[in-house]
Image (spheres, rainbow, N blue to C red):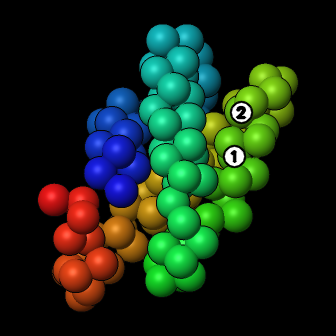
Amino acid sequence: MGTIEEAGTAVLTLTEGLEKEEFLASRLTRAETRRQLRLMSKSALLLSPEVHALLVEIDWEGWRALDQRLATSDKAEDTLLWLAVRALAPDTLMWLRVYRKNQPEWFKEDN
Protein backbone atom coordinates (compact mmCIF):
# COMPACT_ATOMS: atom_id res chain seq x y z
CA MET A 1 0.00 0.00 0.00
CA GLY A 2 3.06 2.18 0.16
CA THR A 3 2.92 2.76 -3.60
CA ILE A 4 -0.69 3.88 -3.34
CA GLU A 5 0.20 6.33 -0.58
CA GLU A 6 3.29 7.67 -2.36
CA ALA A 7 1.52 8.14 -5.68
CA GLY A 8 -1.50 9.65 -3.94
CA THR A 9 0.71 12.15 -2.15
CA ALA A 10 2.29 13.03 -5.50
CA VAL A 11 -1.18 13.60 -7.01
CA LEU A 12 -2.17 15.92 -4.18
CA THR A 13 1.13 17.81 -4.43
CA LEU A 14 0.91 18.19 -8.22
CA THR A 15 -2.64 19.51 -8.11
CA GLU A 16 -2.57 21.56 -4.91
CA GLY A 17 -4.29 24.90 -5.38
CA LEU A 18 -5.26 24.21 -8.99
CA GLU A 19 -8.73 24.78 -10.34
CA LYS A 20 -10.10 22.38 -12.95
CA GLU A 21 -9.38 24.71 -15.86
CA GLU A 22 -5.79 25.26 -14.73
CA PHE A 23 -5.26 21.54 -14.31
CA LEU A 24 -6.66 20.74 -17.73
CA ALA A 25 -4.62 23.52 -19.36
CA SER A 26 -1.35 22.20 -17.96
CA ARG A 27 -0.28 19.38 -20.24
CA LEU A 28 2.72 18.41 -18.10
CA THR A 29 0.85 18.45 -14.78
CA ARG A 30 -2.04 16.52 -16.28
CA ALA A 31 0.31 13.90 -17.79
CA GLU A 32 2.24 13.36 -14.54
CA THR A 33 -0.98 13.27 -12.51
CA ARG A 34 -2.37 10.69 -14.92
CA ARG A 35 0.81 8.61 -14.51
CA GLN A 36 0.56 8.75 -10.70
CA LEU A 37 -3.13 7.83 -10.79
CA ARG A 38 -2.26 4.84 -12.99
CA LEU A 39 0.29 3.76 -10.36
CA MET A 40 -2.40 4.04 -7.72
CA SER A 41 -4.98 2.11 -9.72
CA LYS A 42 -2.54 -0.64 -10.71
CA SER A 43 -1.40 -1.02 -7.10
CA ALA A 44 -5.00 -1.07 -5.85
CA LEU A 45 -5.89 -3.84 -8.29
CA LEU A 46 -2.90 -5.93 -7.17
CA LEU A 47 -4.18 -6.07 -3.60
CA SER A 48 -6.00 -9.23 -2.65
CA PRO A 49 -9.77 -9.44 -2.32
CA GLU A 50 -9.16 -10.02 1.39
CA VAL A 51 -7.45 -6.64 1.71
CA HIS A 52 -10.27 -5.00 -0.25
CA ALA A 53 -12.75 -6.60 2.15
CA LEU A 54 -10.84 -5.35 5.20
CA LEU A 55 -10.51 -1.79 3.87
CA VAL A 56 -14.16 -1.59 2.91
CA GLU A 57 -14.42 2.21 2.99
CA ILE A 58 -12.02 2.58 0.06
CA ASP A 59 -13.68 2.77 -3.36
CA TRP A 60 -11.95 -0.23 -4.94
CA GLU A 61 -14.53 -0.35 -7.72
CA GLY A 62 -13.74 3.29 -8.48
CA TRP A 63 -10.05 2.38 -8.84
CA ARG A 64 -10.95 -0.51 -11.13
CA ALA A 65 -13.11 1.74 -13.29
CA LEU A 66 -10.43 4.43 -13.40
CA ASP A 67 -7.80 1.90 -14.43
CA GLN A 68 -9.99 0.57 -17.24
CA ARG A 69 -10.80 4.06 -18.52
CA LEU A 70 -7.20 5.27 -18.40
CA ALA A 71 -6.11 2.18 -20.33
CA THR A 72 -8.21 3.43 -23.25
CA SER A 73 -7.42 7.10 -23.64
CA ASP A 74 -10.30 9.27 -24.77
CA LYS A 75 -11.46 12.86 -24.36
CA ALA A 76 -13.82 12.02 -21.49
CA GLU A 77 -10.64 11.28 -19.59
CA ASP A 78 -10.28 14.93 -18.47
CA THR A 79 -13.40 14.86 -16.30
CA LEU A 80 -12.44 11.45 -14.96
CA LEU A 81 -8.94 12.65 -14.04
CA TRP A 82 -10.35 15.65 -12.23
CA LEU A 83 -12.80 13.48 -10.30
CA ALA A 84 -9.93 11.18 -9.28
CA VAL A 85 -7.82 14.19 -8.24
CA ARG A 86 -10.55 15.78 -6.14
CA ALA A 87 -12.30 12.72 -4.71
CA LEU A 88 -10.89 9.25 -5.32
CA ALA A 89 -7.23 9.90 -4.47
CA PRO A 90 -7.75 12.10 -1.38
CA ASP A 91 -10.50 9.85 -0.01
CA THR A 92 -8.30 6.79 -0.44
CA LEU A 93 -5.37 8.46 1.34
CA MET A 94 -7.63 9.58 4.17
CA TRP A 95 -9.02 6.07 4.70
CA LEU A 96 -5.56 4.51 4.54
CA ARG A 97 -4.44 6.88 7.31
CA VAL A 98 -7.50 6.00 9.40
CA TYR A 99 -7.00 2.26 8.91
CA ARG A 100 -3.24 2.51 9.57
CA LYS A 101 -3.93 4.32 12.84
CA ASN A 102 -6.78 2.09 14.01
CA GLN A 103 -5.55 -1.26 12.66
CA PRO A 104 -1.74 -1.03 12.45
CA GLU A 105 -1.44 -4.83 12.37
CA TRP A 106 -2.98 -4.81 8.90
CA PHE A 107 0.00 -2.79 7.66
CA LYS A 108 2.83 -4.82 9.20
CA GLU A 109 4.03 -6.19 5.85
CA ASP A 110 4.03 -2.63 4.51
CA ASN A 111 6.90 -1.56 6.81
Farthest top residue in view: 28
Label 2 Cα crowd, 10 Å radius (few <14 / some 14-19 / many 20+): some
* Residue that appears at 70% across and 64% down: 61
Left/right placement of residue 41 relative to residue 106 reads: right
**Circles 2 and 1 in contact, beta carbons < 8 Å:** yes
Q: How many marks?
A: 2
Task: Tell me the residue at 60%/72% (across/down).
Answer: 49
Amino acid type at mark 1: Leu
Residue 76 percent location from the top left of the image: 82, 33
Residue 75: mark: none
- Asked where in the image residue 74 lies, by quadrant, the reply is top right
SS for tag 1?
Answer: helix
User: Looking at the figure, which quarter contains the C terminus?
Assistant: bottom left
Q: Amino acid at mark 2?
A: Leu
Q: Secondary structure at mark 2?
A: helix
Is residue 43 in view? yes
Q: Which residue is mark 1?
A: 66
- Looking at the image, which residue is at 46% across and 21% down? 32
CA–CA distance in space, label 2 to label 1: 6 Å
- Frontmost residue, 17 versus 34: 34
The N terminus lies in which quarter of the figure? bottom left
Q: Measured along the vertical axis of the image, is residue 6 above or below residue 100?
A: above
Q: Which residue is mark 2?
A: 70
In the image, taking residue 37 as reference, residue 97 lies left or right, namely left
In this picture, is 104 found above or below 20? Answer: below
Q: Nearer the viewer, residue 40 or 105?
A: 105
